Image: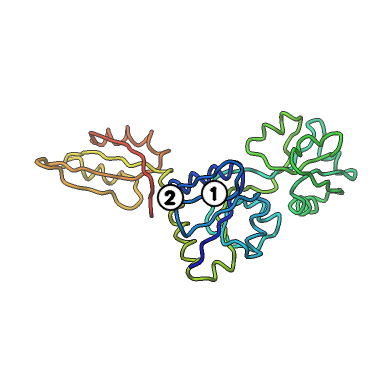
Amino acid sequence: MDKLRILIPKGRIFDNVSKLFDEAGFPMYLADRTYRPVIAADWLDAKIMKPQNVGELLELGSHDAGFTGIDWIQENGADVEEILDLGMDKVRIVAAIPAETSEAQLKARKIVVATEYVNLAEKWLKKENYNYRILRTYGATEVFPPDDADMIIDNTASGQTLKDNGLKIIATVLESSTRFVASKAAMANPEKRGRIEELAMLFNAVLEGRDRVMLEMNVTEENFNELVSGLPSMRSPTVAPLCGSDGFAVKIAVKKHEVPELIPRLKKLGAGDIVEYDLRKVVP
């Protein structure tokens, strides 16, 4: 089979995707000033591209799968198949205006809107009945108001950069995160589809593992039924009899955020020798 050709964006997305590959069992190495990462799997061939280009290149069929934000998939109208929402690099595409300006003032006249997201902006501005002209930007969009634009439509994680530049958010146009996507042609090829689905399964197992911990505990036979009936778990807990004792060893995989409230409750239900440890992968 031909190698599976993967596109990975530059910058923060690359760092997160590289870590994901590593935890999935495929360490990745990128030498300085190169665009061809080396992945520890002879059936994978990777290339670095800007996230804006990933969807369109997949649609053209020059690559099989890749990673990019759903914002750029929708902005470019790329006809690709979404395989997995990785939930990473979360941003909002927002409309923001100078803090001293009101929306009513802007709707009373024709305005200039600065953005990299020309298509998303146009769709939203029409829906909101603005009279506008779009000014395409190529980064640093927040510097345009108030001199060169009345509004911007841009991505933000926390909104702090916008606030630091005297802007206020008036609407969220789209919520975005990094997605694992594939070309329609690759998904029509049984061998490539199989490889892509295997990667997705491993990536999902890593993400599930990051979100959960394993709790192990001992409990007497007297307290066993009450303890087990109050346990959260992915399915049912794993139970084994203790050697030379009337008790049981119990294991459960739980969400990390549940642990602070769960451990005191387990103690009250009679659990002892409670041990918590991280999981590397969880395959539901």
Whichever of labels 2 and 1 marks the residue nearer the N terminus, that label is 2
Q: Is residue 126 left or right of residue 10?
A: right
Asked if residue 212 is positioned above or below residue 63 in the image, the reply reads above
Q: Estimate the x, y position of residue 153 in percent, counting from the top left.
A: 75, 44
Asked if residue 93 is positioned above or below residue 3 in the image, the reply reads above
Number of callouts: 2
Residue 170, located in which quarter of the rendered image? Answer: top right
Quadrant for the C terminus, please: bottom left
Residue at (63% x, 65% y) in the render: 61
Amino acid type of disc 2?
A: Ala
Q: Estimate the x, y position of residue 43 in percent, counting from the top left.
A: 47, 60
- Residue on which the image places disc 2: 24
Secondary structure of the residue carrying tag 2 is helix
Residue at (33% x, 38% y) in the render: 277
Secondary structure of the residue carrying tag 1 is loop
Of the pair 46 and 113, the residue shown nearer to us: 46
Local packing at callout 1 (Cα closer than 10 Å; few below 14, some 14-19, many 20+) is some
- Residue on which the image places disc 1: 37
Q: Is residue 263 left or right of residue 142?
A: left
Q: Which residue sits furthest right?
A: 109
Amino acid type of disc 1?
A: Pro
Q: Estimate the x, y position of residue 129 in percent, counting from the top left.
A: 82, 51
Q: CA distance from mark 2 to mark 1?
A: 16 Å
Q: Estimate the x, y position of residue 271 in percent, counting from the top left.
A: 24, 36
Q: Is residue 118 left or right of residue 266?
A: right
